[in-house]
Image: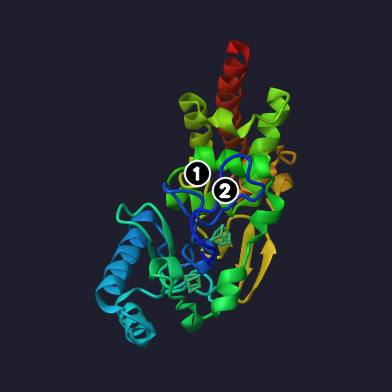
Amino acid sequence: MARKPLSLNDGPESPFVHLCQPDASKSCGACCGLYNYADSGREDLAERLRGRTRLFRETVRGPEDLPRFSEVVKGREDGRKRYEVIHCCEYVGFLDEGERRVGCLLHPMQNAGRDMRDVSFYGRELCDGHFCPSYSYISRAEKLAVLEILDDWYLYGACITDIDLVKEFFRLVSEAAGEMPAPARFSDPALRKAARRFFELKLAWPFRSEAANRFGKYSFDGTDYSIFVIDYEALGCGKSRFDRIFLSLQSAFKNRRDVQKAEDLIRQHLEDVVGRYKELVDYH
Ligand code: SF4
Ligand code: SF4
């Protein structure tokens, strides 16, 4: 649920890092079910959000118009979900003209101060008060670094909610670099580009499983889920040091050679990041 007020980050000294609506270039709507449509590709989602936003702006003047809005959206969109137990909210839309920020069309900041989230599946209180686990588990430095690195809603939402991917990336970079890079370092264009290329693997990973019941490290079975396990023994090799990253990237390997190729890819991306970071540190 993209629920908190917009753009609360007050700069690097602010103790609280706002992940839902961090700045003008991106935002997240993952817990409103944005990625839970059967087709959750970038273009399909953008098309949905564009249509809803237009309809909302044209037809909703107050809460009395919302039942009709909901009916029209549900009637014209493909409502098939990946996981039935996860709700997909019809009120996520684009919040800005440039279609850079996704979020709640019912939020008071979208409606001249009027909060219309009472009608939602979760209700206003839940929508307003929810903080996903990323708020707790991702450190402040890691959050600020991700905000420097990513600037598009689709990739940002997919990555900021993937705690393992974020934490493993910074852990491995910190180990190789000898320290956690200060978040501001990622404003260097070459370092940002190298780090972004790593996170882009989330969308273009050659070993990604297309199994309908997989979602990152999770494996769904009807209404229940479990953590997927890569059976390295069956593949003829030991557990990879990149296991957590492989799971986040929803990997499925056919054989040991696949694992080796995947490890090479991750290693190369990390080396690019660490190599550029060391250049920056040495230069100063
Ligand atoms: S009403 Fe829907 S879009 Fe708005 S915060 Fe709640 S779940 Fe998200
Ligand atoms: S998944 Fe987390 S960061 Fe994304 S909108 Fe929900 S609470 Fe905010």
Q: Residue 37, labelled with which disc?
A: none
Q: Position of residue 75 (x, y in %)?
A: 32, 82
Badge 1 is on which residue?
Answer: 205
Q: Residue at x 73, y 29 (%)?
A: 175
Dot 2 alpha-carbon crowd within 10 angstroms: few under 14, some 14 to 19, many 20 or more: many
- SS at circle 2: loop
Lower position in the chain sequence, tag 1 or tag 2: 1
Furthest residue to the front? 113
Element on which disc 1 rests = loop
What kind of residue is marked 1? Trp
Spatial CA distance of label 1 from label 2 is 7 Å
Q: Residue at x 52, y 27 (%)?
A: 191
Q: Amino acid at mark 2?
A: Leu
The percent position of residue 139, horizontal first and vertical second, equals: 69, 45
User: Is 15 positioned to the left or the right of 34 in the image?
Assistant: right
Could one spot residue 268 in this view of the protein? no
Instruction: Return the residue nearer the eye: 248 or 68.
Output: 68
Q: Are marks 1 and 2 in contact (CB under 8 Å)?
A: yes
Q: Is residue 201 above or below residue 175?
A: below
Q: Residues within 10 Å of mark 1 (few under 14, many from 20)?
A: some
User: Who's the residue at 58% across and 53% down the image?
Assistant: 18
